[in-house]
Amino acid sequence: MIRALLWVGAAIVLIEALFGARGLTAMLEARRQHEALEASLLRLRAENARLREEAMRLREDPSAIEEAARRDLQFIEPGEKLFIIRDARPE
Protein backbone atom coordinates (compact mmCIF):
# COMPACT_ATOMS: atom_id res chain seq x y z
CA MET A 1 0.00 0.00 0.00
CA ILE A 2 2.80 2.42 0.91
CA ARG A 3 4.67 1.53 -2.28
CA ALA A 4 1.57 2.36 -4.38
CA LEU A 5 1.15 5.70 -2.58
CA LEU A 6 4.82 6.53 -3.22
CA TRP A 7 4.37 5.74 -6.94
CA VAL A 8 1.26 7.92 -7.13
CA GLY A 9 3.06 10.73 -5.27
CA ALA A 10 6.07 10.44 -7.59
CA ALA A 11 3.77 10.54 -10.62
CA ILE A 12 2.03 13.66 -9.31
CA VAL A 13 5.37 15.38 -8.68
CA LEU A 14 6.60 14.41 -12.16
CA ILE A 15 3.43 15.67 -13.85
CA GLU A 16 3.65 18.93 -11.90
CA ALA A 17 7.33 19.32 -12.84
CA LEU A 18 6.53 18.86 -16.53
CA PHE A 19 3.18 20.59 -16.95
CA GLY A 20 2.72 22.82 -13.90
CA ALA A 21 2.81 26.60 -13.72
CA ARG A 22 6.61 26.51 -13.27
CA GLY A 23 7.19 23.27 -15.12
CA LEU A 24 9.25 22.37 -18.14
CA THR A 25 6.61 23.35 -20.70
CA ALA A 26 6.12 26.75 -19.05
CA MET A 27 9.88 27.30 -19.07
CA LEU A 28 10.14 26.39 -22.76
CA GLU A 29 7.26 28.74 -23.62
CA ALA A 30 8.87 31.56 -21.62
CA ARG A 31 12.17 30.96 -23.43
CA ARG A 32 10.39 31.09 -26.82
CA GLN A 33 8.68 34.35 -25.88
CA HIS A 34 12.00 35.79 -24.70
CA GLU A 35 13.68 34.97 -28.01
CA ALA A 36 10.79 36.52 -29.97
CA LEU A 37 10.93 39.69 -27.87
CA GLU A 38 14.70 39.86 -28.27
CA ALA A 39 14.39 39.64 -32.07
CA SER A 40 11.70 42.32 -32.02
CA LEU A 41 13.92 44.55 -29.89
CA LEU A 42 16.79 44.18 -32.37
CA ARG A 43 14.50 45.15 -35.27
CA LEU A 44 13.20 48.16 -33.37
CA ARG A 45 16.73 49.29 -32.48
CA ALA A 46 17.77 49.07 -36.13
CA GLU A 47 14.71 51.05 -37.21
CA ASN A 48 15.40 53.62 -34.49
CA ALA A 49 18.98 54.04 -35.75
CA ARG A 50 17.71 54.45 -39.31
CA LEU A 51 15.17 57.07 -38.23
CA ARG A 52 17.82 58.97 -36.25
CA GLU A 53 20.06 59.02 -39.31
CA GLU A 54 17.19 60.26 -41.49
CA ALA A 55 16.30 62.96 -38.94
CA MET A 56 19.92 64.11 -38.83
CA ARG A 57 20.04 64.28 -42.64
CA LEU A 58 16.80 66.27 -42.72
CA ARG A 59 18.21 68.75 -40.15
CA GLU A 60 21.58 69.20 -41.85
CA ASP A 61 21.19 68.49 -45.58
CA PRO A 62 18.92 70.72 -47.70
CA SER A 63 18.96 68.19 -50.54
CA ALA A 64 17.53 65.59 -48.15
CA ILE A 65 14.62 67.92 -47.39
CA GLU A 66 14.00 68.40 -51.11
CA GLU A 67 14.20 64.66 -51.70
CA ALA A 68 11.67 63.97 -48.92
CA ALA A 69 9.32 66.67 -50.20
CA ARG A 70 9.45 65.27 -53.72
CA ARG A 71 8.92 61.69 -52.53
CA ASP A 72 6.29 62.21 -49.84
CA LEU A 73 4.45 65.34 -50.98
CA GLN A 74 5.01 64.96 -54.73
CA PHE A 75 6.51 68.47 -55.01
CA ILE A 76 7.87 69.46 -58.39
CA GLU A 77 10.13 72.29 -59.53
CA PRO A 78 8.77 75.04 -61.80
CA GLY A 79 8.95 73.83 -65.40
CA GLU A 80 8.84 70.14 -64.49
CA LYS A 81 5.93 67.92 -65.47
CA LEU A 82 4.48 65.26 -63.22
CA PHE A 83 3.22 62.07 -64.81
CA ILE A 84 1.13 59.70 -62.70
CA ILE A 85 0.95 56.23 -64.18
CA ARG A 86 -1.67 53.94 -62.68
CA ASP A 87 -1.49 50.20 -63.00
CA ALA A 88 -4.15 48.68 -65.22
CA ARG A 89 -6.52 46.28 -63.49
CA PRO A 90 -6.13 42.65 -64.60
CA GLU A 91 -9.17 41.35 -66.43
Image (cartoon, helix red, strand yellow):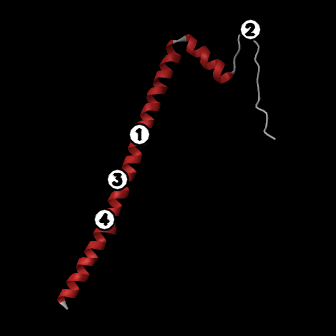
User: Which residue is disc 1 drawn over?
Assistant: 41
Q: Nearer the viewer, mark 2 or mark 4?
A: 4
Q: Quadrant of residue 69?
A: top right
Q: How many marks?
A: 4
How would you rate the neighbour count of disc 4 (Cα within 10 Å): few for under 14, some for 14-19, many for 20 or more? some
User: Which residue is disc 4 drawn over?
Assistant: 23
How would you rate the neighbour count of disc 2 (Cα within 10 Å): few for under 14, some for 14-19, many for 20 or more? few
Q: CA distance from mark 3 to mark 4?
A: 12 Å
Residue 9 in the image, given as x and y percentages of width and height:
24, 80
Name the amino acid type tagged 3: Arg
> Which type of secondary structure does the marked residue at label 4 adopt?
loop
Q: Residue at x 46, y 24 (%)?
A: 52
Labels 3 and 2: the sequence-earlier one: 3
Labels 2 and 1: the sequence-earlier one: 1
User: Which residue is disc 3 drawn over?
Assistant: 31
Name the amino acid type tagged 4: Gly
Q: Nearer the viewer, mark 3 or mark 1?
A: 3
Q: Residue at x 47, y 31 (%)?
A: 47
* 87 horizontally vs 12: left or right: right
Q: Residue at x 77, y 13 (%)?
A: 81
Q: Residue at x 38, y 43 (%)?
A: 38
